[in-house]
Amino acid sequence: MPIPATGYPLTAALSPRVQIVETTDSTNADVVAAVTADPAGWPHLALLVTDDQRAGRGRLDRTWTAPAGTALAVSVVVDAGRVPMALRGWIPLAAGAAMTRAVRARLTGHGSTAELKWPNDVLVDGGKICGILAEAVPGTLDTVVVGAGINTRMTRADLPVSTATSFAAIGVDLDEDRLLADYIEALDGFVSALSGGDVARVHRDIEKLCATVGRDVSVSMPDGTTVQGRAERLDDEGRLVVESGTIQTVVAAGDVVHVR
């Protein structure tokens, strides 16, 4: 089922600009370029969406590809200028939490559940259904583009790795417009809370959604080292606090594996 001819009316009711493209290399790259060329034309919550992204990027410079028509790629503009500088590190986590809520709402009655894997992967029954990449627009600290790749109609045979899943793979007929609208609404709610300085609420809500907290984890750090221990909590900046015996490590960036 391709992108609907009617577009995304529910999403358009919440976003000032919903641009649909048939195919592109990277929605994030497109939106970063568009915002740079025409900032006024891409205000807060403006978005670009496609179901055929050819050269998507994930965190840690990973590539992200999917057969045409089997996944949604959406990039949303976030006006980070309204968020105090000290709280902007929460934006990528807020995006992951917002998508977790949106995915969870689409699973009602299906027996599956969505959880957040720190910092912003969305898992369904332990399998990754969505990844998120947030990046600042070059030359400004006030605009962030948040890209998300959601496995929608991908069959089990199409899944790139055994640890991935999709709505189709778990038997859910997805209303993509409702998913995107729920995501935009939740993301805007988190950004508004951060704008008002209510980081305690954001912290609490994200930590409740985060399956990583309370789990034994192995974290591959950017410097090549590995940290193993129990993920105890998120600190006041959204970083993951991992404890191993008497040693406590605060992880700002890393590749987390949940140890069963």
Image (cartoon, rainbow, N blue to C red):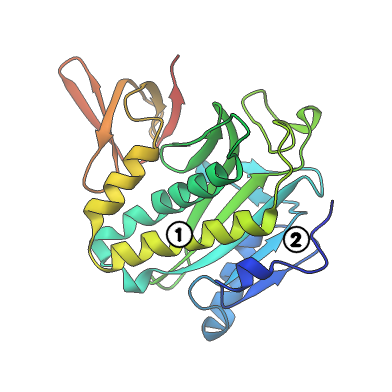
In front of the other: 95 or 143: 95
Residue at x 41% of width, y 73% of height: 140
Circle on res. 229: none
Q: Are marks 2 and 1 in contact (CB under 8 Å)?
A: no
Amino acid type indicated by mark 2:
Thr
Q: Is residue 110 left or right of residue 156?
A: left
Residue at x 60% of width, y 45% of height: 106
What's the CA distance linking mark 2 and mark 1?
24 Å
Which quarter of the rendering shows the C terminus? top left
User: Which label lies toward us, 2 or 1?
Assistant: 1
Residue matched to label 2: 24
Q: Position of residue 96 (x, y in %)?
A: 47, 47
Extreme residue in the left direction:
246
Circle nearer the N terminus (2, 1) = 2
Residue at x 69% of width, y 72% of height: 19
User: How crowded is the residue under tag 2: few (<14 C-alpha within 10 Å), some, or many (20+)?
Assistant: some
Q: Position of residue 189 (x, y in %)?
A: 39, 62
Q: Is residue 61 visible?
A: no
Q: Position of residue 155 (x, y in %)?
A: 79, 33
Name above or below for residue 94 compared with residue 13: above
Q: Is residue 3 left or right of residue 167?
A: right
Residue matched to label 1: 187
Q: Secondary structure at mark 2?
A: loop
User: How crowded is the residue under tag 1: few (<14 C-alpha within 10 Å), some, or many (20+)?
Assistant: many
Amino acid type indicated by mark 1:
Leu
Q: Is residue 140 left or right of residue 252?
A: right
In front of the other: 99 or 137: 99
Q: Position of residue 253 (x, y in %)?
A: 37, 40
Q: Is residue 90 visible?
A: yes
